[in-house]
Image (cartoon, rainbow, N blue to C red):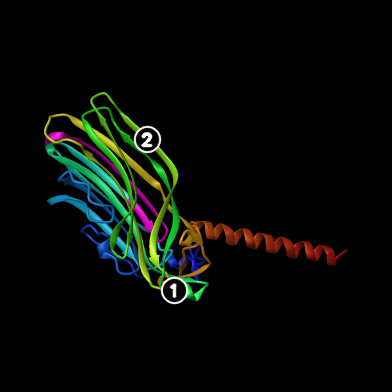
């Protein structure tokens, strides 16, 4: 079974990659896949659940989005929206692969332009099956526990009225669960907002042992105007480019007691393990050179020993 530590840079090939000028959401993925969707423009002021598409006004946003079904393949997307009068400057970018996503959003706008905003949504879905070691437990409901690590900063400038927000939502069989995390603040009228987040997020979902289920993790970094109308500027940043990462399954409990189990996934990934980054191609090259140097040094030393 493949783990979250792919061994081949071929996993970064473009096979399985799709692109769309329109925004993507979890409903656009099948039973397994990862996506990143970056958009900026003028929204309605609502906050859709992370994983659902954002609330853009028709024809007033720019989006780029990518998805993949290839484990280890790294996706990236970026976009911006500018308007001269009333002034809007919004930009966003993000990355995604199975097990890890990064999100960044920034904007500066005149509130008379409406609800200017930018956001990146990123996440993944996979179909998992938990098989209990004890066959008699098949068909019973058990609690699956897992964790994610979130690292980033929310900033709202003390001018105008802006919001800065990060949210993570767990989906089970295409439905949003009660397991989520959200943090938000406002920068306004002389009062800045600043929050550093660097913590593990712990989640629990109830699944049926022996029955396949779709588990989705979707997160969104977003910023925008918190109140539309007055002729003042707002500015904010939500920087979580460094990132949200899977920390592995911490346990499975039945009736409050831990049980033994095995896990399989449609993607072939071993989700019992924590995510580990894939070395960049340049890193692979350095590693190869290092191994060559060591091998050559070993041969030289052996020749020296034979010549004594």
Q: Is residue 105 magenta?
A: yes
Which one is closest to the eye, mark 1 or mark 2? 1
- Visible in this render: residue 7? yes
Q: CA distance from mark 1 to mark 2?
A: 44 Å
What residue is shown at x 11% (from left), y 33% (from top)?
229
Q: Residue furthest bottom?
A: 135
**Residue 153 % position (x, y):** 38, 39
What residue is shown at x 28% (from left), y 26% (from top)?
191
**Residue 62 % position (x, y):** 20, 51
Q: Which mark is residue 138?
A: 1
**Residue 168 % position (x, y):** 34, 50
Q: Which quadrant would residue 290 be assigned to in this image?
A: bottom right
Magenta stretch bounds: 94-112
Check disc 2: other Cα within 10 Å, few if <14, some if 14-19, many if 20+. Answer: some
Q: In the image shown, does 138 or 123 lie closer to the viewer?
A: 138
- Number of numbered callouts drawn: 2
What residue is shown at x 58% (from left), y 62% (from top)?
288
Q: Which residue is mark 2?
A: 195
Q: Is residue 106 magenta?
A: yes
Mark sitting earlier along the chain (1/2): 1
- Visible in this render: residue 59? no
**In which quadrant will I find the C terminus?**
bottom right
């Amino acid at each position: 079974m493949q783990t979250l530590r792919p061994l081949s840079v071929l996993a970064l090939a473009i096979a399985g990659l799709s692109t769309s000028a329109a925004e993507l959401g979890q409903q656009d993925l099948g039973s397994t896949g990862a996506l990143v969707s970056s958009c900026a423009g003028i929204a309605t002021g609502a906050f859709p659940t992370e994983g659902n598409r954002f609330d853009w006004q028709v024809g007033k946003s720019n989006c780029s989005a990518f998805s993949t079904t290839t484990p280890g393949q790294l996706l990236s997307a970026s976009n911006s929206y500018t308007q001269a009068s009333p002034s809007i400057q919004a930009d966003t970018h993000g990355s995604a692969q199975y097990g890890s996503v990064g999100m960044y959003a920034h904007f500066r706008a005149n509130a008379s332009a409406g609800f200017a905003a930018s956001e990146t949504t990123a996440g993944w879905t996979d179909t998992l099956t938990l098989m209990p070691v004890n066959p008699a437990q098949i068909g019973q409901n058990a609690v699956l526990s897992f964790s994610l690590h979130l690292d980033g900063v929310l900033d709202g400038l003390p001018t105008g009225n802006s919001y800065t927000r990060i949210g993570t939502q767990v989906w089970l069989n295409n439905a949003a669960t009660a397991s989520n995390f959200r943090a938000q603040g406002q920068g306004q009228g002389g009062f800045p907002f600043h929050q550093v987040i660097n913590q593990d997020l712990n989640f629990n979902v109830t699944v049926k042992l022996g029955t396949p289920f779709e588990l989705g993790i979707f997160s969104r970094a977003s910023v925008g105007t918190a109140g539309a109308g007055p002729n003042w500027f707002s500015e904010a940043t939500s920087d979580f480019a460094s990132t949200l990462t899977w920390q592995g399954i911490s346990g499975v409990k039945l009736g409050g007691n831990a049980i033994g189990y095995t896990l399989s996934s449609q993607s072939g990934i071993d989700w019992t393990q924590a995510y580990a980054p894939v070395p960049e191609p340049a890193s692979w090259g350095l590693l190869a050179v290092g191994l060559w140097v060591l091998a050559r040094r070993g041969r030289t030393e052996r020749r020296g020993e034979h010549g004594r």
